[in-house]
């Protein structure tokens, strides 16, 4: 069985090589066949070009450089479509997502449709305490309004079965669009499809290299708009 690790990148030159090396180290301990799919949105710092140069002789590492599009969620969608794995892992490329959790995810995905790394599962946490508590409050809002029994919609580190995505027609562009709001939509549709969730504890570390692409005000606006659209959709379904 093949595992595909999807890495969307934009200006991550200082992180990507070490991250790929760490992923390889941890995934090889699981004895799964694997591939690592880097989708770079034509980074000015030449992240994609660096990966192409350094890993050109490693057939397990595939690098795609998209020149006409820059969008986080669509890069994930693109990577999944280009991948071959029966199991898909999606993670950020700034080391906020610990590669050590890959082995735990692969062990547990045998029993669930999606395994989510969560800062708010028991023994999880975050280095930036202000961000940790603000996100916890907002995640509580999402959990309440969407009636989905998970604690972290916003971390974005997860493992999912491809057959579940395909069977329930969830590999759709209108789900994988925007920034982190794509995962709110994905979680909603997984829940509506009867998917099984498991959360495992994760610790959020602040990035070492590079600048964050997050715009807090824009994120709150977009995520709230997304959640309210899903709520209205849910009410409409129930009425009909």
Image: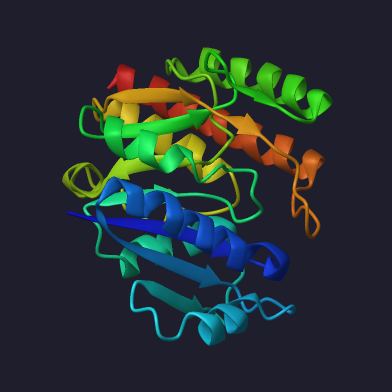
Does 144 sit above or below residue 198? above
The quadrant in which residue 57 appears is: bottom left
Q: Nearer the viewer, residue 111 or 75?
A: 111
Q: Nearer the viewer, residue 213 or 141?
A: 213
Q: Residue at x 50, y 41 (%)?
A: 157
The quadrant in which residue 154 appears is: top right
Indicate left or right for 181 with 185 as reference.
right
Classify the position of the N terminus by image quarter: bottom left
Say whether residue 68 is visible.
no
The quadrant in which residue 186 appears is: top left
Q: Residue at x 62, y 69 (%)?
A: 70
Say whether residue 31 is visible.
yes
Q: Residue at x 78, y 58 (%)?
A: 209
Q: Nearer the viewer, residue 101 or 69?
A: 101
Indicate left or right for 137 with 120 as reference.
right
Does 103 sit above or below residue 61? above
Classify the position of the C terminus by image quarter: top left
């Amino acid at each position: 069985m093949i595992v595909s690790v999807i890495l969307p990148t934009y200006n991550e030159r200082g992180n990507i090589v070490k991250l790929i090396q760490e992923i390889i180290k941890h995934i090889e301990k699981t004895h799964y066949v694997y591939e690592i799919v880097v989708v770079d949105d034509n980074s000015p710092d030449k992240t994609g070009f660096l990966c192409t140069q350094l890993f050109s002789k490693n057939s397990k590492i595939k690098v795609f450089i998209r020149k006409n599009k820059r969008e986080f969620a669509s890069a994930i969608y693109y990577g999944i479509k280009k991948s071959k794995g029966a199991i898909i892992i999606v993670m950020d490329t700034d080391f906020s997502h610990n590669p050590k959790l890959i082995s735990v995810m692969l062990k547990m995905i045998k029993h669930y449709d999606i395994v989510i790394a969560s800062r708010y599962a028991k023994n999880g946490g975050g280095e930036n305490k202000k961000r940790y508590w603000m996100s916890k409050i907002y995640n509580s809002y999402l959990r309440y309004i969407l009636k989905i029994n998970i604690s972290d919609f916003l971390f974005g580190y997860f493992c999912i079965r491809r057959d579940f995505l395909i069977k329930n027609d969830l590999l759709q562009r209108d789900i994988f669009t925007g920034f982190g709001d794509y995962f709110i939509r994905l979680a909603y549709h997984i829940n509506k499809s009867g998917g099984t969730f498991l959360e495992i504890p994760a610790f959020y570390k602040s990035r070492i290299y590079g600048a964050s692409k997050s715009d807090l005000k824009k994120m709150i606006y977009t995520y709230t708009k997304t959640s309210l659209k899903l709520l209205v959709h849910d009410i409409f379904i129930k009425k009909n």
